[in-house]
Amino acid sequence: MDHRQLVKDCLKGELAAQRELYNHFAGTMLGICYRYTKSMADAEDVLQEGFLKVFRHLHQYKFQGELGGWIRQIMVNTAINYLKKNSRYQTDLSFTDTGLHPVTADDPESLLGAKELAELIRQLPPGYQTIFNLHAVDGYTHVEIGKILGINEGTSRSQYARARTLLISWINKHSADVKTEFYARRP
């Protein structure tokens, strides 16, 4: 698919090109939106709002870098804005400047699959989940996260450390449960 021509056709208002752009990126972008929300319905709302922004601002795409990366940035920003303005997330999306919990550098031994890990991340409180996704998954620095969320860099680091500590404890518990179950089934 020639993204350059597709963008040009979308800018001309060609519905077939807009549909093709949406169909090509919607699945991947829905996954990104789902990482930040607590339900598929919310993720779909974010996706639709994000694509409205994509088409509204497509003229700003300068053909530098991947089109998918540009769209991804819009989706992440749309998801963050959705969390900030949606009353259901506002009470849970709190960030405090309290001290760091100790975090080990060891990787926990785990029999956890990628799907199970993604589901554990989704179970984090929304503030932790948001910062964990922004830093660990999407690669933002804590300075960038602070600017995006309107918090200081230290708060981002603290929330990330807490999310990581919580995930590690859940993974360790899961690994212990799997091992116990394995040994219980052995004759």
Image (spheres, helix red, strand yellow):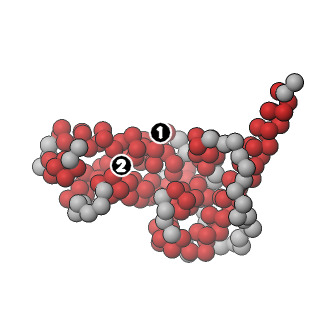
The foreground one among 147 and 68 is: 68
The residue drawn where x is 66% and y is 59% is: 164
The residue drawn where x is 46% and y is 67% is: 148
The residue drawn where x is 76% and y is 37% is: 178
The residue drawn where x is 62% and y is 41% is: 113
Quadrant hosting residue 166: bottom right
Residue 101 is left or right of residue 4, and the answer is right
Q: Name the residue under label 2.
A: 49
Residue 137 is left or right of residue 94, and the answer is left
Residue type at tag 2: Glu
Does the CB distance between marks 2 and 1 fall below 8 Å? no
Q: Name the residue under label 1.
A: 41
Residue type at tag 1: Ala
Name the image quarter holding the N terminus: top left
The residue positioned farthest toward the right in the image shown: 187
Q: Residues within 10 Å of mark 1 (few under 14, many from 20)?
A: few
